[in-house]
Amino acid sequence: MPVSTTPPQDFPPTTIQHIQNCSFSSWYDTFAACTLKSRIIPLEEEFIEYLNADGVFLPRGEDAAEEDHWGGSGDESGGEEEIGDDRSPSFPELQRRIEQDIEDLGGAVFPKLNWSSPKDAAWITTGTTLKSTTPSEIFLLLKSSDFVAHDLGHAFEKCENGPTRPEKFELVLKKWYDLLPSMEFRCFVKDGELVGISQRDVVNYYDFLSEAREDLEDSIIEFFEEKIKGRFPDPDYVFDVYINQRNRKVWLLDFNPFSLTTDSLLFQWQEILRHPTSQPPIFRIIESQANATQSPYPAYTTSRLPREAIDLSSGASIEEFAENFRRRLYDAVTED
């Protein structure tokens, strides 16, 4: 994956309004017909304070016992901090709303906040995905994610003027689908024209993409022309799509700011900025195994982990201490 060396002054100014336009609730109604079915839940400031609090712990509730800290309990605690804590927050109304929305969306959801999903925390779940079926799973993912923490405190930090964070946050629950990483693409729009398309999974090489690249490119361009172009309020933006491998139907996944804060994946940002809008977009995929990012783990697995998790590792592998961390936490929240 290229490391961008593009100076910030080469970009159009990043405004708070542009960042807000990329917030899920700002665009969902406009593009609901071509994106995944979702629910949006306003979050109280008390819940934001819980997410910002130090430590990885779950709130008290119907599915979390009073002893709800991750650290374990009983004879297995090994002298660790007691997990019962009367100061643990409780969000019964939010939990009930989440449970109802999960049921309405088919029993499993993909959670995110206004902009970011907790994909860097997927290692903590049993299936190492963001598939969530309970409020506790969602809370755990949000509480463990650096990406979510950035949204909470620094969403506007690259903007010229104004606060560093929005006044209100929202929890977005998307209906869960088993999406193939190979069929996700990031699209770059400059001056209202599509100028670049990149494979999103830069860790893996998929040989079939080379054979299908012309069809895939045509599908994305057609989708942009028919569903996206002229409907997003800014001339410069980034959007992500998923292509159904069987029927080539394209689905909108998200919008992202046109700025250095958005990963340019297989491009250098200078390529995007300098590509003439009068020319067809550049379509870029990983052409060989040698060009794939050399990592034995899925993207973000080796992102910075919570100190609590590292303390549990004792030199174990990522898989081993992640499993240990999950076991201790879920033992705590399921105890009677």
Image: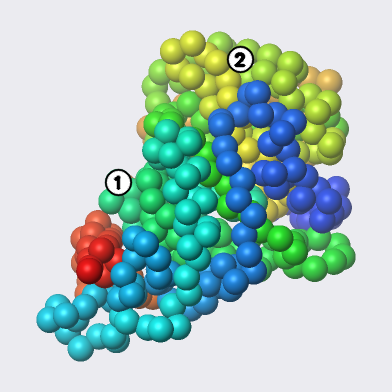
- In the displayed structure image, the side of residue 35 where residue 98 appears, left or right: left
The answer to whether any part of residue 121 appears in the image is no
Secondary element under disc 1, as helix, strand or loop, is loop
Above or below residue 59? Residue 176 is: above
Asked if residue 215 lies left or right of residue 29, the reply is left
Residue 180 lies, in percent from the top left, at 42, 29
Query: Which residue is depicted at the point 52% across and 76% down?
Result: 53
Quadrant where the image shows the C terminus:
bottom left
Q: Is residue 185 left or right of 237 when viewed as pictured? A: left
Q: Is residue 204 visible?
A: yes
Q: Which mark is residue 219?
A: 2
Q: Which mark is residue 127?
A: 1
Q: Nearer the viewer, residue 8 or 253?
A: 253
Between 291 and 94, the one nearer to me in the picture: 94
Residue 330 place in picture, x, y as percent: 27, 63
Quarter of the image holding residue 161?
bottom right
Above/below status of 271 relative to 221: below
